[in-house]
Amino acid sequence: MKRFAFIALLLSSCFIATAFSQQTITLGFTVSRTGALNVDSVEQYRGFELWRDQVNAAGGIKAGGKNYKVQFASYDDESNSKRVQQLYTRLILEDKADFLFSPYSSSLTATAAVVTEQNEKIMLTTGAAEEKTYKLGNQCLYQMFAPATQYLTVAIDALKAKDPKATVAFVYEDASFSVAVVTPAKAYAQQQGFNVVFSEAYAPNTTDFGAIIDKVIGSKATVLLGGGHYADGSTLARQLYGHKVPLKMITLLVAPDSPQWAELGDAAVGVIVPSQWEPQSTFKAQYGPSGADFGKAYTAKYNTPPSYESAGGYASGLILQRAIEQAGGIDTAKVAAALNATDVTTFYGRTKFSTQPSEHGLQVGHAIFLAQWQKDKSGKPVKQVIWPLAGKSADLVYPIH
Amino acid sequence: MSGIFASMIDGLLIGSVYGLAAMGLSLIWGVMDVINLTHGAMIALGMFGMYLLFNATAINAYLLLAPMIAGGLILGVIIYWLAVNWVVDRPILMSLLSTFAVNMMVIGIGTAIWSTSPYNVDFSVPGITVGEYTFTGNHMFAALSAVLIALLLEMFLRRTRTGKAIRAVADNRDAAELMGISSTRVLMVAFAIGIALAVASGALVSTLFPFTILSGAGYQLKSFVVTVLAGLGKPFGALVAGVLLGLLEGAVSPFIAISWIPLIEFGLFVLVLIVFPRGIFSRATA
Amino acid sequence: MTALLEVQGISKRFGGLLAVGDVSFNLMEGEILGLIGPNGAGKTTLFNLVNGVYKSDTGSIIFSSKNITRSSPDQVVHLGLARTHQIVRPLNGMSVLENVTVGACFGREYQSRRTARITALEVLERVGLASRANSPASSLTLAGKKRLEVARALAARPKLLLLDEVLAGLNPTEIAQMIDLVRSIRDSGVSVFMIEHVMQAIMNLSDRIVVLNLGRKIAEAPPREVVQNPDVIVAYLGSPDILDKLRGSA
Amino acid sequence: MILRRPLLWLILLLAALFAWLPLHGNNVSLREDLILVALAIILTSNLNLMIGYTGYVNFGHIVFYGLGGYVGVYLMTVRGWHLVPSAVTAGFAVSLMALLFGLGILRLRGAYFALATIGVLVAVQSFVSNFEPWGRSTGMYVSFESYAPLGGPRHALWTTYFLIVAVMALSLILSLGIKASKFGLGLFAIREDEDAAIVLGVNATIYKAIIYSVSAFLPAVAGTLMFFKNGTIDPSIAFEFMLSLEGIVMLMLGGQGTVAGSALGGGLYERLRSYLLTSPRLSEFHLVIAGALLLLVIRLAPGGLIGWLYRLVPRSREVIE
């Protein structure tokens, strides 16, 4: 008898859920809960999650006279593209996702895009900075991050202003994103008159940088640019410090942006990261919360300050929300039109997508800036914006020691 | 000091840790003809064990090796009865699969607890600086500990009754049984020591590099290379081969991109297998 | 009669040990040639040299007027030289019939699988294993496995069959049956070269006997002459007058 | 005759069901599930040719799949070839490479061979990670233009799916054909006792090299198809050691040495893995469950599911090969 009652309850709850489903939109995505991309991907996910909770607390997205509550459908992609297509197909067809967010990383996103494109589903991408993905002919992708070419060229500009005679070493992860970043940066450095004395890519799962570090020392480089993702970047920094490599400037991709970076202690200090967003940035938000409000809410929820992945995640939600509001509903074609027309500044900065067919969806509004880990008065490492000079919160410390 | 010397010293130091890891694999393989595919998972458990112990006690990480080895022995006995005892003398596929199954379970549980994020043991010993090159204290202590453990094992195998019994069983199990040696007990002890060595090497690696629950796999592959270079069932030879492998890495890395090193190592591995199937340190017999 | 197998000065050395040294002999068509010698005399090594498991360090082996000195065991089988193993080696995971089919498939005639099956059934009938055709090979008794060894070799349709101690470990009834089988094989036109420890049997069966001691041939003669050869007696018993001594002490 | 064997008709029925089920009602979700099942069956049944038929444990079987993917994707994106010729060429190229590798490492037996296959896998992966024309660690992308000759991405994915199902059917028919052939008998003899087999006239060196090469062909074709569908290929997904190991698990689960076992094991394991991964409560424990399952199977039913069926219903041996 009890069992019957239970089943009846279950059935009726399903029924109720369907009755309200018109008022709900489903956002589908995969998260790398395990595997190499775990840290960065989860930070991105927290951005999504905070946005969802705030929207739902405010009664949902209001568009065309309706209130849409936001719900998520998500799976673990294990940082591996093997199942990405299976999972995105499932998200689209079984979970009936209305819109999609990308997995973390350029290569997983490219794999997911094959499925989302042919189902003509809009997918906002964060953590997929590499330009190539947007130049394969995709028409339904929208990139939230500033593209990869910008990451290190900005650092070279900052270096040029400080020490045009520096000798440069590139040490970077042999992965889509970092190769896409370093290749143009190397050319740019030479064009700016720097002597590039060493350049080597390391395998994505490297933990022992001893051999590379010996080579960097041998090359007499004074500046090191490169890195990849969190795991390898933090290890590289730690070992550079342990081996007392005499470098005046270290700029690493992605890793130093994470709040976890502070755990490196003294090894953390002085390292620069090209960033999509920093809590100190003072963009005047035309839409959505201010940077300070976002930071406060995020820290309250997760007990840690947001990284730019988190901000990117939140901003993806925000941009989608705005597009739905402007489209007056969740019709894909109308939302796509609204996204194509988007040119807005939020706490995250300016967002504008390219509408040229050859590079549709490429981010053209957003820009990279640089942040450096410096010691505050109490000696604790904190991140300061040092570039562009107009938006800086502290001066570049050069050389590090 | 020139780069190649620095690089070879680094190689020597890390090579002794590879050697220690391989000793465990080599011992088990040599004594009971089981290729222990839990090896990588045990190395990973060594890493996390050290992480937990160090965070709980905050004493010198290298002193914690003793409790780690004790823990490894217990773990070894458990795994022996869970997955190994009943596959000894069965076709090689059986032991490969049963140890692989345990490996999957350990990795699965580890992933559920620690996810696959990197962890660090925040312990560092000041290093020695020679010119521009600095050799970290951790590398030196790890190498020293590895050699010390290897010597202790060698003494155990040569001097004690149980040690001699292990060697006898490795040599010829039937003959050893005829002489009244209980092979099940000996196999269990040998297996437990093998696991303890893997755990110890994982604990040492955790003081050098960050690690995830999946990190053991790479060291397991290196252990295969080292074991084959040394020849089976020669634990001390494995240590020597490990050091040689480290030196080789150190010697070639200044001249080529390090991403080519695995190709060289594993290419060499396959060649050695084909040319000297019993290891380069064994005399050829018909 | 012509020589089917001509062995000329073959040797095999393992490390410092001379297993077979400069051995020569001929085997005539239609003949049963026995090979005897004390333990460790190098009999099985000689077989292994003849069928190509080992390569001889010196000399030559001509089989059916083809030089097979450097041939591999599988090539030798195709020429019509099949053998059995002293320690039986059934293909345990397969049925008795399949075991024999392998012999026929890859033997001298290189039969198709379908023909091989028919051959195998015939051979099984002949060696008395027909009733066990579909049993797993592992389920046979030792005597059964010895028969299976012979059947597999016979299925290859050989001109010459090497039998390595097919009688060892059998009881008297089984020995009698096996002796009949060997005779019938010879009568069907297959030459036989056999190692045997059961003296009575080999003396009965063989046309001639080769005796090995410490890797060297010490005699080659019909059975009756062999037992009276002083070298052979020394090799087997230590000294020529040992029999007298034993009698004296008894 | 192969036509008289019931399993052949079962295989064709299975392939027909695979093709028809997702097409009926345009169920793309089912298609995506089934394509991974088909892939698992392809890998398992070809691995079975080495492990089950010949008794050689190949830990690096996935290297064929990965290399096939690379050769095929390279031909398509850089050389502009069409899908099918690329896939077939990849199959032949990888088979040839396997033949060469095989003649080297097949001199080894037992555990030494198993280890050498791991060595080959890591060495090849490392080579590809450094190989400039194939994009080093970054790998290659399939441009959307490659889908155009097949009628756009939507159409292309269906075509790929049908091709994969066809490769699956071919894999199983190949296994079935070899099993009943003289060649297969030679392989079984090698599996049982290689030295005895040689003395019985089996040319083991050649047979092993041929089967190693044959077992590379269809996985390589499948590699091209799958990575074309995937849109990207890089060394870490092309040469995943874990997938290689899972292949062995699937084979043991179903029953090594049997055609039906390789299909059953591949299919069941892949469905279980998919289910665990997408189930919210169990997804963290999928490895634990798979590991425990494997331990139970080899302990209680070392012949796998088919072996267990044989014991239960001995006559089934004649139908379910």
Image: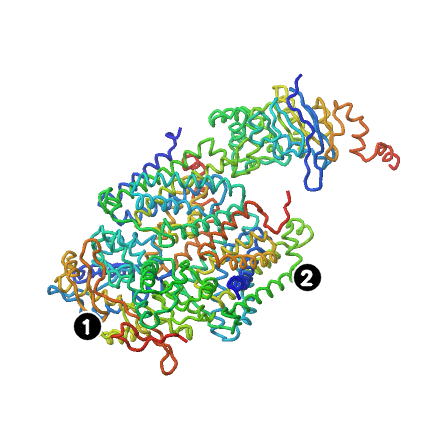
Residue B22 location, x and y as percent? 55, 57
Q: Nearer the viewer, mark 1 or mark 2?
A: 1
Label 1: state its secondary structure: loop
Subunit under mark 1? A
The residue that disc 2 covers is B159
The residue that disc 1 covers is A285
Q: Which mark is residue A301?
A: none
Q: Residue at x 26, y 54 (%)?
A: A113
Question: What colour scheme does the image use?
Answer: rainbow
| D189 in relation to D237, above or below | above
Residue C99 location, x and y as percent? 53, 32
Task: State the image quarter where residue A272 is shown.
Answer: bottom left
* The one of D180 and A17 positioned closer to us in this rendering: D180
Mark 2 neighbour density, 10 Å: few (under 14) some (14–19) many (20 or more) = few
Label 2: state its secondary structure: helix
Q: Which quarter of the image is occupied by the C terminus of chain D? A: top left
Which amino acid does the dot numbered 2 rest on? Arg
- In the displayed structure image, the side of residue A14 where residue A396 appears, left or right: right
Task: Say whether residue A1 is visible.
Answer: no
Task: State the image quarter where residue D43 is shown.
Answer: top left
Which amino acid does the dot numbered 1 rest on? Ala
